[in-house]
Amino acid sequence: MSSYTASLYTRFEDYVKLTKPRVVMLIVFTAFIGMLLAQPSLAPAEVLIYGSIGIWLVAGAAAAVNCLIEQKIDAVMARTRGRPLPTGAVSVTETVLVSVFVGGLGLFLLHVFINPLTMWLTLGTFVGYAVIYTMVLKPLTPQNIVIGGASGAMPPILGWAAVTGEVTHESLLLFLIIFAWTPPHFWALALYRRDEYARAEVPMLPVTHGVAFTRLHVFLYTLILLAVSLLPFVVGMSDWLYGISALVLGLLFLFYSYRIWQSYTDAIARTTFRYSILYLSLIFLALLLDHYLIL
């Protein structure tokens, strides 16, 4: 590989990092599950492919805007100081161009190959995350995660709308699961990163209300999550396979959150944060298996 080719590859890699591919992967996964759950039979391949790509691109554009707005905060925090903007690997202009191109392409694909409703919902989600959450809620209120979680909970609705062309109560239940999951997930992270958030002057709950208050609320919101996660089974959207899975996964999450509340250490918070990511993946996988295996 020539030095010029290597330089191009490195530059492309930096652009990809701007889009937070690991975060976006979970977003697209839940959107994809929404597509697969939207009807009894498998959705057309074109919808699955173009829907996933379009949502992926717009979510990546929103992540790039988030990196742009939060570059000074990212430079302070150990978890994010290696991102392309704080290190100077990419410029502000490049970040704007990447976001406009990637986001525009994603919206175009959704409008042309899926349906206008999905395109507009995805654009609204972009605005909710990149503008309302990042620019307004996160720097101003410790409830940033609770209120801003609405945009992060939208992917299953986007996937559902891509297949059916409408938003139904079933898709709203999927939305509620992620919406209820978001606070305990991010507050677990904020607990063991609280000193960094304080230095960056980000009003996360442990910074503004203290560790004890946050520990209690991680537990309380996990209780809410457990109840919400059982709703698809309660209303008949899913069967026993999902019901048992949601109960077991939720009780394990509740166990971790109880330990945060009663016997806190940073290690427990870190373990809870990691489990929360696994939890969300597994509970949506359980929904999918229940949908296609239980007749």
Image: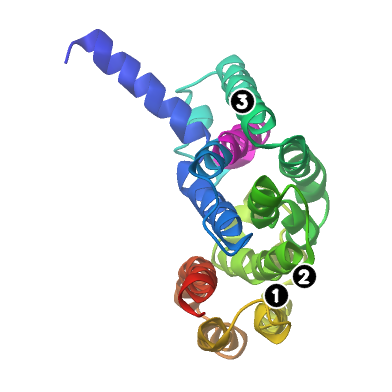
Residue 104 is drawn in which quadrant? top right
In magenta segment, residue 62: yes
Name which of mark 1 and mark 2 comes first in the sequence. 2
Q: Residues within 10 Å of mark 1 (few under 14, many from 20)?
A: many
Residue 98 is drawn in which quadrant? top right
Residue contact at pointers 1 and 3, CB within 8 angstroms: no
* 259 to the left or right of 58: left
Name which of mark 1 and mark 3 comes first in the sequence. 3
Residue that mark 3 sits on? 99
Which residue type does callout 2 highlight?
A: His
Q: Residues within 10 Å of mark 3 (few under 14, many from 20)?
A: many
Helix, strand or loop at mark 1 = helix
Residue 13, horizontal then vertical, whole percent: 38, 28
Q: Which residues are magenta?
A: 54-74
Please count the marks in the image. 3
Residue contact at pointers 1 and 2, CB within 8 angstroms: yes
Residue 72, horizontal then vertical, whole percent: 62, 35
Residue drawn at (76%, 43%) of the image: 121
The residues bearing labels 1 and 3 have C-alpha atoms spaced at a distance of 34 Å
In magenta segment, residue 132: no
Q: Nearer the viewer, mark 1 or mark 3?
A: 3
Residue that mark 1 sits on? 214
Magenta part, dominant SS: helix
> Looking at the rendered structure, which numbered label has been put on residue 209?
2
Which residue type does callout 3 highlight?
A: Ser
Q: Nearer the viewer, mark 3 or mark 2?
A: 3
Q: Residues within 10 Å of mark 2 (few under 14, many from 20)?
A: few
